[in-house]
Amino acid sequence: MVALGDLVKTLNAAFESKDYESCEKIIPAVKLELIKNKIFLPDFTNTNEQYINDLNITKRILEIGALTNIFLSRNEAFENDFTQLRTFYFCKNEKLANSENKSKIICLYLLVLRSDGDVTKFHSELEYLDRHIPNLEDDKLLSYPIKVDRWLMEGLYQRAWELLDAGLNIPEFDVFNMTLMTAIRDEIAHSTEMAYQELPLSSIKTLLFLDNEKDVETVADDRGWTVSNGIVKFNQEDEDDEDEDDIDDGFENDGLDFNKTARDRLKVIDNTLDYAISLETIV
């Protein structure tokens, strides 16, 4: 166990000093020693106190590995670590299931799924967590991705943006905030160009949470929009124009039941734009 003890001490020192590149290099050797000492894959039927203590070392190594991968943006490697940690976090042995990092790492896993756009897997994970963690939304950390997802699904982009912008003063979360905020901006931009033919440049700045009109021009260039005389035109193609004509016909004919998706999109953007502009006026 001497070699393992020395490696663990070195790994802990590197992690505490935020030297994540060194952590990434040390972790494979540590895991190899865990395997040699037969404590990498847990046997939860073994209740020997020393064995449980050794498994807690394994759990700690996996947590360091998971957090290291977050800081290095190794999402796939993080998910692999989380898969192993899940066996600890949801086992029947309380000494192994409890950890000061448990809520943080579960929350980070949810943020990985949401930032990757894997909404189905995100909600499947929520269902699992809801069955195994009482009062799930009372946990400050676990409620964070739940709120972000809920508000994104409901089109309440302003609330989701404000929550992400405020953050939780947890460095690991900052890795995902920019990704999620970019996703929100892209979703609003896509819905806007589907719902409108043009809008004032100043309104787009407010709607997309941009700092200045120069940033709007950058987004416009990336998305193929045209900016002229303070107006942003969304350059809808002929096919989109035909779809828009169909939407107009739906409003004229039977209104409530025709092309509901398009009308819902328009309503969401209208509400978001009105709210954002009102907020900007107040400020």
Image (cartoon, rainbow, N blue to C red):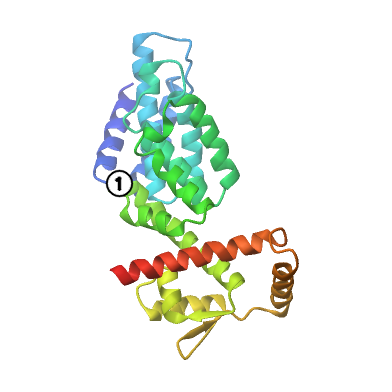
The answer to whether residue 58 is above or below residue 188 is: above
The number of numbered badges drawn on the structure is 1
Residue at horizontal 74 percent and vertical 76 percent from the top? 242
Residue at numbered disc 1? 170
Picture quarter containing residue 241? bottom right
Viewer-proximal residue among 31 and 196: 196
Quadrant, the N terminus:
top left
Residue 132 position within the rendered picture, expressed as x and y whole percent measured from the top left: 48, 25
Helix, strand or loop at mark 1: loop
Viewer-proximal residue among 243 and 67: 243
109 on left or right of 6:
right
Regarding residue 60, the answer to whether it shows in the image is yes
Regarding residue 116, the answer to whether it shows in the image is no
Residue at horizontal 75 percent and vertical 68 percent from the top? 253
Residue 68 position within the rendered picture, expressed as x and y whole percent measured from the top left: 37, 44
Residue 131 position within the rendered picture, expressed as x and y whole percent measured from the top left: 51, 26
Is disc 1 surrounded by few (<14), some (14 to 19) or many (20+) residues within 10 Å?
few
Residue 167 position within the rendered picture, expressed as x and y whole percent measured from the top left: 32, 51
Residue at horizontal 37 percent and vertical 15 percent from the top? 52
> Amino acid under label 1?
Ile
Quadrant, the C terminus:
bottom left
Viewer-proximal residue among 181 and 56: 181
